[in-house]
Structure formats: structure tokens, C-alpha cells
Image (cartoon, rainbow, N blue to C red):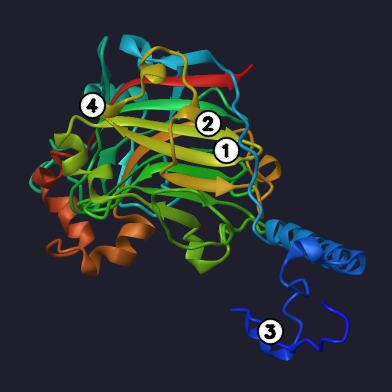
Amino acid sequence: MKLGVVSESRPVQSSHPSAQYGYADEPSRWNPRYWRKRVWAGIAVAIVIIIVIAVPVAVTQTRSDPYPNYVPLNYSLVETYEGESFFDNWDYFTGYDPTHGFVHYVPREHAQQLNLTYASETAAVLKVDTSVGPNDEPNASTGRFSVRVTSRNTYHEGLFIFDVRHTPYGCATWPALWLSDPYNWPDNGEIDIMEAINQADDGNQMTLHTTSGCRMNVRREQTGEGLQSNCDHAENQNAGCGVRGPEESFGPRFNDNGGGIMALEWRDAGIRMWQFARDAIPADITGGNPSPSTWGTAASDFPSTRCDVGSHFRNSSIIINITLCGDLVYAAYGDSGCPSNCTDIVSNHPEVFTQAYWELGPIQVYQAA
């Protein structure tokens, strides 16, 4: 600038909107490079507050939806029921049926005489009598002959592998494969592994029956359909807390597919069951080294979240039976599609029971090392 020359004032040229207000050269408030320490301090405080709030919320959410730790266990085989000696370590129940069935359970000698139980090197069979008709003497007017066997050995926890070749079905039938202490029921609990009634077209039902204080209205990881959530035998007419499998898990469709494997893992963390079709049995089962942690989602899951498994289940035997009519069948017979009434079918129609038999391969019991 030359002395004595007055310069002309020119407006600032800028494309930023703030230029029109005369502070175009000021740093942008949205640029973190120009933030002051007090701004950064405020952000740090805000982050701490968010963490303080978020952590308890996450912990509370976890506590409200807990799930037991099914840590993998190493199992060793301790017992096998198989071959021609299959029935040697079982007791045959006789007398009045506790479930009010229209049946006469017979002792071993009578069962063998009627061919209701027999075993070969590859399979064991338990069946309902089909030889007695309405004109025979004696007839079945007071109930039909059948079988209920209980293992002499008892168990508290374990991994049980059942090779099931054929499941019983037919109008009036009520077969079951289960674990319980029949002398201390319901105090020592009941675990139903396979159970169905009549034509078994609703699929397999897996159920727990207990004393009070065992509920399943909790997080569960299973493929089956949960039914009642209260396992207490004194509630819901002893329905227990059941899980229903698909139609092919019991009865004609199961049998036509060659049966399969039922696996029960019973431990303090919970009780889980899996079913594998004949062509989908895990290699670790066939290889004698079963590892439930590799089997994927169970068919039924009864976690210990609101049920102390250790105190509700103990001292259980394996039980296999086929009762006829009985409490469960009577309650559903009218909607079963079966003819006449339950006791008439049992008394006068032995041909209905040609498919009312269990055929089993080996039963293996494993215990955690």
C-alpha cells in the first residue's frame, strides 16, 4: 500500500455459508481437530455413563434368561442289555396296574409260555397277547395279557442309548419306555423317554413327572413342541411337563423307517433327549464313544434353571411296558378315531394288537468319567 492511498474494502469470497456472517476463517465446530479439552472431557463422561447403565442392564437380562452350562462330559460304557440274556437282569411286574389299565401283567415264565417276551442275539421283543379271543376260556374279559419289565440296576444320572427297532401302536394301547423308582414315586421322579397312545399318530412324547418345585417356563433349546411347563404330578392331572416330537418319531412312520436311536442325557445341569433316524445315527454312537455336545439341538430339553434335577430325580430303573386302556387312553379315546370303546377292543379284538410290540436292539448305559 502506498502512503496516502486509501484501499477499497472488498467482501470476503467463500463458498461456505458462514462467510456471509464474517467468520469464514474460523474453525468448524464439527471438526474434531478443533475441539477443546472440555469437549473431549464431556464426551468421555458420556461414554462412562453409557457403560455404567448398559452393563447392569446386560447382566440383568442374562439373569432373567439364564441357561445351564452343558459342559461336555467324557462318558464310559458301564452296562449293556443285549443278546439272548437281555431279560436276565429285569424283574417282571405282576398284579394291579398303577395306571388303571385293562391288562394283566404276567410273570416271566408265563410271558415266555405265551411268547410275550423273547430275545435273540440281535433283538429283544416285548408284546401284547394276541392269542386269546372272546370265545376262549379263559378270555380277556377282565383284561389282556401283557408285560412290564423293570431293570434290577438303578441309576442316578448317566447317558442312556436305546436302539429301538419297532414301537407298539394300535387302538387302546399305551406303551412307554421310561425311567423311575416305582417304589418311591413321585418323590424320586419319572423320565418318560418314549410314550404314545392308540395309533401313535401324534408323535413321541418325552415328559418329566416330579414333586412340586420343578418348572420348565424357562429358556430351552429343543426341536420338539413344549406342552405343559409345570412338572408337578399334583397339577394338571399329572400331565407333567412334556415335549412332543414329530409324527415320524413314534408308531407306523417310525417303524417303517427302520426305527432309530433314542438317547437320554441325565445330569445335574438338566435332562436332554435326542432321536436319530436309522440312517442318521452319529458315528460316535456307533463307535462306542458318544459325545452329546456334538449332536446339535436336542429333541427335548429340561434345564435345571427352575428345577433342581439332582433332588427331583434319583435311584431310577429302566422300565419298558405296554398297558392297555388306562388313565391316559381313557381320557383321549373318544377323539382317537378308534371304534367302540376301549375295554371292548381289549376284550374282544385280539387282531387289533398285532403291532403292539417293542423290538429293541442293545440298551447301553454310560457314566461320566
Q: Are marks 1 and 3 in contact (CB under 8 Å)?
A: no
Q: Position of residue 167 (x, y in %)?
A: 25, 37
Residue at 21% of width from left, 24% of height from top? 115
Task: Provide the residue designation for mark 2.
Answer: 317
- Say the numbered circle drawn on residue 181: 1
CA separation in Å, label 2 and label 3: 86 Å
Task: Indicate which disc, 2 or 4, sits on the residue closer to the N terminus.
Answer: 4
Q: Position of residue 357 (x, y in %)?
A: 23, 35
Visible in this render: residue 313? yes
CA separation in Å, label 1 and label 3: 86 Å
Residue at 45% of width from left, 46% of height from top? 300
Visible in this render: residue 138? no
Say few, some or many: other residues with alpha carbon within 10 Å of mark 2 (under 14 / 14 to 19 / 20 or more): many
Location of residue 116 with respect to 200 vertically, above or below: above
Q: Are marks 2 and 1 in contact (CB under 8 Å)?
A: yes
Location of residue 5 with respect to 288 vertically, above or below: below
Q: Amino acid at mark 2?
A: Ser
Say few, some or many: other residues with alpha carbon within 10 Å of mark 4 (under 14 / 14 to 19 / 20 or more): few
Q: Position of residue 192 (x, y in %)?
A: 45, 44
Task: Provide the residue designation for mark 3.
Answer: 18
Q: Secondary structure at mark 2?
A: strand
CA separation in Å, label 2 and label 1: 6 Å
